[in-house]
Image (spheres, coloured by chain):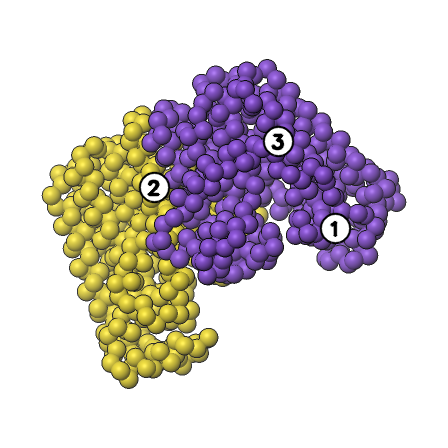
Chain colours: A purple, B yellow
Amino acid sequence: MTTPSVKSKTAQLPEIFSHYRSDIDQALRLSLSSDGSAVYDMLRYNMGWVDTSGRPCEATEGKALRPTLCLFASEAAGGSVDQAVPAAVALEFIHNFSLIHDDIQDGDATRHHRPTVWAVWGVPKALVAGNILRVIADRSLTGLLERGVDPDRALAAGEALTEAYLKMIEGQYLDLDYEGRPDIGMYDYLDMISCKTGALITSSLKLGALIATRDQATIDAFVRCGESLGRVFQIRDDVLGVWGDEETTGKPVGADIRRKKNSFPVVYAMAAAGPGDEATLSRIYAQDRLHDNDVDTVLDIMDGLDTRGRADELTAEYSEMALTAMSQVKLEPDAGRRLRELVHFLRLRDH
Amino acid sequence: MTTPSVKSKTAQLPEIFSHYRSDIDQALRLSLSSDGSAVYDMLRYNMGWVDTSGRPCEATEGKALRPTLCLFASEAAGGSVDQAVPAAVALEFIHNFSLIHDDIQDGDATRHHRPTVWAVWGVPKALVAGNILRVIADRSLTGLLERGVDPDRALAAGEALTEAYLKMIEGQYLDLDYEGRPDIGMYDYLDMISCKTGALITSSLKLGALIATRDQATIDAFVRCGESLGRVFQIRDDVLGVWGDEETTGKPVGADIRRKKNSFPVVYAMAAAGPGDEATLSRIYAQDRLHDNDVDTVLDIMDGLDTRGRADELTAEYSEMALTAMSQVKLEPDAGRRLRELVHFLRLRDH
């Protein structure tokens, strides 16, 4: 392999994640505590809480980025953590719903070193389980009223979530539609990730903010911050999809090249390559399957174009934009620090 | 083939369907009129309005039972058709969303004599298209406020729809879970269809009623009527799945036997069979695939147990219950007649 994998020294999760973790965990687990049907075991398995037989296991949970952003925004904008919890739960479940369906779409049999839901229970049941999780997410929002959020705010939160969700799946559709198309440029890519990934990240901050405040300028600032954060997150994700450390990400180096994903490195390389490299890339990507030496060739071309360097520059720019968006807003104490640490982490994370 | 197919003389759609048809059609088409993305062509294709290239075609639309029930309930309970239209649209799209996903789950490549969405565009895009239709359904409900429905009624409609939708997919999960299980009895079956099919049909009447009136006794009556109608509809559907006329239903006689569906005829036959027939059925259903002579054997056993006669008795009983539920409620003129014609049709329909 020509390219060493990404091993960052900043892999430690910043404090913002642990600050909201117990609120999030408790609410998520309560929402899936029903014993009514075996489908809940599938959902708890997907969350990393139980094994395939439904027995509690060593948790392999995700970072819970979206609910963390939501609770952070609510607190930072002067509201309560407690009132935003139902929105945080909804966001995490919608994210997980999309992972279950994504794994079906992509035929991915493992995620975070565990078999995916469809790989354990088959496609039909996984499809239904994903749909059920999506409804549980919707239902969670009714908890806003119970926690004293004004009805018009609760309604606005519901609408924002629905819009974000629609944008997210339209982005997933674009991602599928772009597959194998050589005409996809950097703007198409950036638009696509704004939908596929950015919409839910943006709405995480937006929901937290609009539950906490009626000040539209503050809400708008969180939205702009989220739009930039979404790009930081996805571009870094794409870098990890090509150069991530197998032990940390669960994917071998070059994984997303082999899968011909429309990710940042290949879109950038196609755009930046001279005629010779462009012809090589086109020839390789025109094949049905990529072999090991094809992947190595693509990696060499990407290295020659300093693709990782360009990705790092871009994520640094978007990180700056995310922080600038918030600079006009008066935040609660600690919020500024938490946000800076978070942005730094998202830009340099290795998992 | 030992058993003649069902050819009913009552196949004509009763007047209730034409009465609301243009309101429904117009609103459905408007909701999918966006040109934004190619995914809308997939959705319009699924509705039967365009061909696979997006060109308008001879419409092969469904009956639009659920929106018809919704508009009927609203008008019958003294409300307006216009105000209930957004709910009617939501119900039809949720129904169609579930058809798109069902066809993926069941691997069905044709429906109503046309290739299914996944058969044309592949499973990943079909999955996403279904999810998009589900959001479009949700968004339709925001139209209730625009049409002057009180916010608390609009909220109640949203909650009722979410509950119905959750029940529907839990029913789909049960249906999958029951597949190939010999221990599924008549009560399990009736519970399962109450969820899988009954929930959306019931909520169609419920939504219409609660948009039109605040009288809880009236809303409850529509709910009870819907619960019985749902059973009439599904038991008749199951009869058509075994004995339906191929030309009308698009499926050969015995289709659901060959597919080992947990439908009324086989659940009833298993329950009613003596030891000999039961052993034969168990042996046949324990096979991975059923052959033509297996299907014929099962049909013979079902005939011997007068399975169709029992199904007809049951649908007659539930039809009676549906009408009785409404007998205490003061309906608008024509509503009683429309409901009786509809119940009669659902009980005896051949498609």
Chain letter of the residue carrying label 2 = B
Q: Residue furthest right?
A: A276
Residue B185 lies in quadrant = bottom left
Residue at point 19%, 60% (across, down)? B316
Determine if residue A177 is in view.
yes
Determine if residue A184 is in view.
no
Residue at point 67%, 48% (across, down)? A248
For the residues marked 2 and 1, what is the alpha-carbon distance in whole angstroms? Answer: 45 Å
Q: Nearer the viewer, mark 3 or mark 1?
A: 3
**Disc 1: which residue:** A254
Chain letter of the residue carrying label 3 = A
Residue at point 50%, 40% (across, down)? A92
Q: In the image, is residue B268 above or below residue B98?
A: below
Residue A339: horizontal and vertical position, in percent? 60, 27
**Disc 3: which residue:** A342
For the residues marked 3 and 1, what is the alpha-carbon distance in whole angstroms? Answer: 27 Å
Per the rendering, the mark at residue B327 is: none
Horizontally, residue A158 falls left or right of residue B159, namely: right
